[in-house]
């Protein structure tokens, strides 16, 4: 090896060491993140968002908002006599966002997708269900493509029941479960095993329903590591064996008794699953924010009460589970919870007063907060730099493959209203970059060099990933994580889960490393499908690469 190169490398390392204390100061003092405006006008308000494995994001709002600000391509119009706003509509209500090119392409969705639900299937196709009016029984698919030829496909009457404000989850057998929705105290699967298969009753949704407010919509649903579903509605949860239709466990109500699901609209995540290759894996759920009991009726009377400032955290796999309460730096309703590649949780968007629903939110919370689940109670929350854009009702946020968080939407009106309203309809797209993307950490950031194409791999298999880190590697602070891309709407990210994989790092050469990763052991841990894989070094993630677990 050339001795000059070696010497300069050593000097560089020395310099990095000398600079380290100063950089840490930056990290702790100014670990506040950065906002960037990506698009000042995508034509629609980002009510629903889903990242696909071709690096594009599908965004849609509703078809009966009246004309949007983006035309359908090639002079196309949608002719729908049943549309409540505009029977002949030549504007788009769905777009495809290309992350790398930062461009928008209008899409044509045929029936009303308002307040619907969805998830990406195992083959990477987005499957979206329900909506309003003529869309309430529809199932729609969107198959990712790279030549701009793809668009929404519609399966009329794909659902047994109308689904409006329901929640979906991908299952280990490759089907999706669709749970609840307005006046639907039941669940169904898609696709169905036979055309005769109907919906199944779920009494828990009757028990948690307050008929005046319907405070159990968009329930928080997570696939537990034992294969059962954790279902949270209103202020409490059950563990549900969906195959037998049996409640396996009833969890205690969240202390305080206030509702957390729509329209009280807190949010929830399944915290990172660890040691996923063997032994007993515990699972924890974190529920944050919402609006107190009575907030909706108060808002109807023009009284916007303060949002909840508490989170509840519970070990859902414990034999005697109990909620542990924590206090957030700010109260928040309609916040989104996004799991970052390093396992931290970003709480973003929303308001500090009022509730979800038309015109019912006040006092936007502009600063996101990062929650570090592995820190001790009292040192988990960190307030981030504020945005300048209120993100009220019908806003959303999702993780991108490069570690940024895409933020869009906000429309608390029954139409697109840009003037003479407190919170105008918002057509912008922003990105929030957590401090780990600060250029100061560029030399600590892992860069994955192989595999280069999306590998397909089974359960409990070894995957070899090569990466570079230009600064000195701290082998003990390497993590490999996989993240399922979520379907996000109304402050809940359906199908969101992050797994920390078992791994070993070896040195291949100067700045080049190899990590042997064991994929999850079963579909209960990670249903078959596409995941973003990140190598994380000292909490700083690489860009993600897609893997398909099959
Ligand atoms: C979008 O809004 C701008 C500014 O009001 C207007 O000039 C343009 O015609 C609109 N485009 C569509 C397709 O509605
Ligand atoms: C409009 O609604 C009616 C009544 O539900 C239905 O029969 C008809 O097929 C719908 N038309 C279209 C174009 O969807
Ligand atoms: C919003 O826009 C619609 C349609 O243009 C209009 O009818 C309605 O009055 C507006 N609402 C407000 C609050 O200005
Ligand atoms: C990493 O090394 C440990 C100890 O040698 C071993 O038990 C484990 O199975 C290895 N994991 C992988 C993914 O190779």
Image: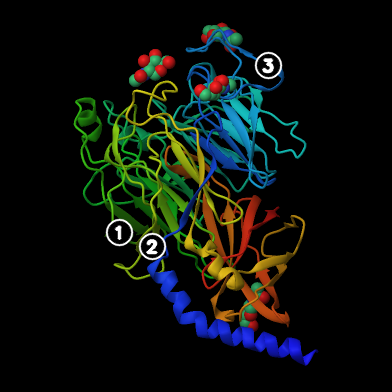
Q: Determine crowd level at label 3: few under 14, some 14-19, many 20+ residues with C-alpha closer than 10 A.
A: few
Q: Is residue 492 above or below residue 473?
A: above
Label 1, secondary structure: give it.
Answer: loop
Q: Are marks 1 and 2 in contact (CB under 8 Å)?
A: yes
Label 3, secondary structure: give it.
Answer: loop
Classify mark 3 as within 8 Å of ligand 1 or not, answering yes or no. Answer: no
Q: What residue does disc 3 label?
A: 76
Closer to the observer: label 3 or label 2? 3
Q: Position of residue 387 (x, y in %)?
A: 41, 47
Whole-number angstrom distance, CA of label 1 to CA of label 2: 9 Å
Q: Which mark identifies residue 322?
A: 1
Q: Where ligand 3 lies, by image quadrant?
A: top left
| Residue that lies at the very extreme toward the right in this rendered image | 1
Q: What residue does disc 2 label?
A: 318
Q: Of marks 1 and 3, which one's residue comes earlier in the chain?
A: 3
Q: Of marks 3 and 2, which one's residue comes earlier in the chain?
A: 3
Please state if 478 lies on the left or on the right of 394 as rendered: right
- Residue name at image x 31 percent, y 54 percent: 311
Closer to the observer: label 1 or label 3? 3
- Residue name at image x 42 percent, y 25 percent: 418
Classify mark 2 as within 8 Å of ligand 4 or not, answering yes or no. Answer: no
Whole-number angstrom distance, CA of label 3 to CA of label 2: 55 Å
Placement of the N terminus among the 4 image quadrants = bottom right
């Amino acid at each position: 090896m050339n001795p000059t190169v070696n010497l300069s490398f050593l000097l560089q390392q020395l310099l990095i060491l000398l600079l380290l204390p100063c950089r840490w100061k930056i990290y702790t003092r100014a670990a506040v993140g950065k906002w960037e405006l990506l698009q000042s006008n995508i034509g629609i308000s980002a009510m629903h968002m889903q990242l696909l494995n071709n690096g594009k994001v599908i965004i849609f709002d509703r078809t009966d908002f009246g004309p949007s600000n983006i035309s359908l391509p090639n002079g196309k119009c949608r002719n729908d006599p049943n549309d409540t706003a505009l029977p002949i509509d030549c504007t788009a209500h769905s777009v495809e966002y290309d992350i790398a090119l930062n461009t928008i392409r209008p899409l044509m969705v045929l029936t009303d997708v308002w307040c619907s639900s969805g998830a990406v299937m195992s083959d990477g196709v987005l499957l979206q269900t329900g909506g309003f009016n003529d869309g309430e029984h529809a199932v729609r698919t969107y198959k990712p493509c790279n030549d701009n030829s793809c668009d929404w496909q519609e399966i009329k009457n794909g659902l047994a029941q109308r689904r409006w404000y329901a929640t979906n989850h991908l299952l280990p057998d490759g089907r999706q479960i669709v749970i609840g929705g307005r006046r639907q105290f039941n669940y169904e699967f898609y696709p169905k095993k036979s055309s005769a298969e109907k919906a199944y009753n779920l009494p828990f949704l009757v028990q948690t329903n307050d008929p005046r407010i319907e405070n159990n919509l968009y329930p928080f649903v997570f696939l537990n590591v034992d294969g059962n579903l954790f279902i949270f509605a209103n202020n409490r949860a059950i563990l549900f064996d969906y195959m037998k239709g049996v409640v396996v466990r009833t969890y205690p109500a969240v202390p305080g008794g206030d509702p957390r699901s729509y329209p009280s609209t807190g949010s929830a995540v399944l915290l990172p699953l660890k040691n996923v290759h063997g032994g007993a894996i515990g699972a924890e759920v974190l529920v944050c924010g919402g609006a107190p009991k009575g907030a909706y009726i108060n808002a109807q009377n023009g009284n916007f009460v303060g949002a909840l400032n508490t989170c509840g955290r519970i070990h859902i796999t414990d034999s005697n589970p109990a909620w542990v309460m924590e206090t957030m730096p700010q109260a928040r309703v309609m916040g989104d919870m996004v799991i970052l590649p390093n396992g931290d949780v970003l709480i973003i968007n929303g308001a500090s007063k009022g509730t979800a629903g038309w015109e019912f939110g006040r006092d936007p919370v502009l600063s996101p907060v990062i929650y570090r689940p592995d820190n001790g109670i009292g040192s988990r929350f960190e307030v981030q730099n504020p945005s300048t854009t209120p993100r009220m009702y019908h806003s959303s946020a999702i993780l991108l493959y490069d570690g940024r968080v895409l933020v869009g939407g906000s429309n608390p009106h029954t139409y697109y209203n840009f003037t003479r309203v407190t919170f105008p309809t918002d057509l912008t797209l922003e990105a929030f970059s957590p401090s780990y993307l600060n250029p100061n950490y560029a030399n600590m950031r892992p860069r994955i060099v192989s595999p280069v194409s999306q590998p397909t791999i089974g359960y409990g298999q070894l995957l070899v990933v090569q990466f570079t880190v230009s600064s000195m590697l701290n082998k003990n602070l390497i993590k490999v994580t996989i993240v399922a891309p979520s379907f996000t709407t109304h402050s809940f990210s359906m199908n969101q889960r992050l797994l920390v994989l078992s791994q070993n790092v070896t040195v291949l050469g100067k700045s080049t490393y190899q990590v042997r990763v064991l994929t999850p052991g079963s579909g209960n841990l990670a249903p078959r499908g596409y995941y973003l894989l990140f190598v994380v070094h000292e909490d700083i993630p690489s860009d993600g690469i897609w893997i398909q677990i099959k």
